[in-house]
């Protein structure tokens, strides 16, 4: 079976990034031959070129980064648990309405999927997750001109996509949705922008 490799940029604050991540994870868990790299993007930092100190260098903004940093730790140190943690961090914000700037909230999202939050926090305190977060964010802008999430990258094309529905546990729906995105990216580069003028739901 031929595999398809792509990256998906996310920020746990974004409900559309949650929708895209749910589709990708559901599709993979249902057997879709995707090799996916989840990469972090900070909506707080965005593409800010105002001359203000970047969020990574501002201690007052550290809380804005902890959810993304926690996701990076799990992805890189506990990869077998990443899907569960990734979805839990989205859910605690968008289903439970909690504040991802609160360490206790982020810890709770990790613990409820069986992770040791203390181990994750030790890694965050070591500093490398924030450095990785910064590197992924800055590379996304330098290489792909990202301006927001969710953005799919495969391999030299980057496409910002807003999915209005969630897969609701349906692997076939998830896979057909992601296949459609990948087909448009790969086979229809002439379509640069396609956006409904109103939300048809």
Image (cartoon, grey):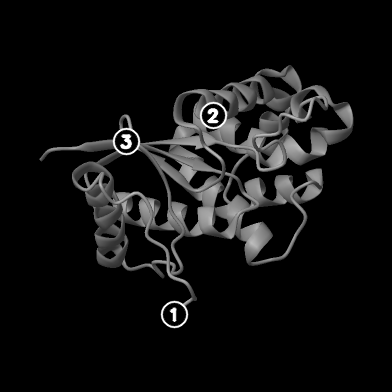
Give coordinates of residue 154: x percent, y percent. Answer: 32, 35
Q: Nearer the viewer, residue 129 or 159?
A: 159
Q: Earlier in the sequence, mark 1 or mark 2?
A: 2
Nearer to us of marks 1 and 3 is 1
Q: Earlier in the sequence, mark 1 or mark 3?
A: 3
Above or below residue 198? Residue 81 is above
Q: Quarter holding the N terminus?
A: top left
Q: CA distance from mark 1 to mark 3?
A: 28 Å
Above or below residue 31? Residue 52 is above
**Rendering quarter of residue 177:** bottom left
Q: Secondary structure at mark 2?
A: helix
Above or below residue 73? Residue 183 is below
Pointer 3: residues within 10 angstroms few (<14), some, or many (20+)?
some
Residue annotated with mark 1: 200
Residue annotated with mark 2: 141
**Rendering quarter of residue 118:** top right
| Relative to 88, 169 lies left or right | left
Q: Earlier in the sequence, mark 2 or mark 3?
A: 2
| Relative to 9, 110 lies left or right | right
- Is residue 77 something that shows in the picture? no
Q: Which mark is residue 94?
A: none
For the residues bearing labels 2 and 3, Cβ distance under 8 angstroms: no
Q: Nearer the viewer, residue 59 or 129?
A: 59
Residue annotated with mark 3: 154
Pointer 1: residues within 10 angstroms few (<14), some, or many (20+)?
few
């Amino acid at each position: 079976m031929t595999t398809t490799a792509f990256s998906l940029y996310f920020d746990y604050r974004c409900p559309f990034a949650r929708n895209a991540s749910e589709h990708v994870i559901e599709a993979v868990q249902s057997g879709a031959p995707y090799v996916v790299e989840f990469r972090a993007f900070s909506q707080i930092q965005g593409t800010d070129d105002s001359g203000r100190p970047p969020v990574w260098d501002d201690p007052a903004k550290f809380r804005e980064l902890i959810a993304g940093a926690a996701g990076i730790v799990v992805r890189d140190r506990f990869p077998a648990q990443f899907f569960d943690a990734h979805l839990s961090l989205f859910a605690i914000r968008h289903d439970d309405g909690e504040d991802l700037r609160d360490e206790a909230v982020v810890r709770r999202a990790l613990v409820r999927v069986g992770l040791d939050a203390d181990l994750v926090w030790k890694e965050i305190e070591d500093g490398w997750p924030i450095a990785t977060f910064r590197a992924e964010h800055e590379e996304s802008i330098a290489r792909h001109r990202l301006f927001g999430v969710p953005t799919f990258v495969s391999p030299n094309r980057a496409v910002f996509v807003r999915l209005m529905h969630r897969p609701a546990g349906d692997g076939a729906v998830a896979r057909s949705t992601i296949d459609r995105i990948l087909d448009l990216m790969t086979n229809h580069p002439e379509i640069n922008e396609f956006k409904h003028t109103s939300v048809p739901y």
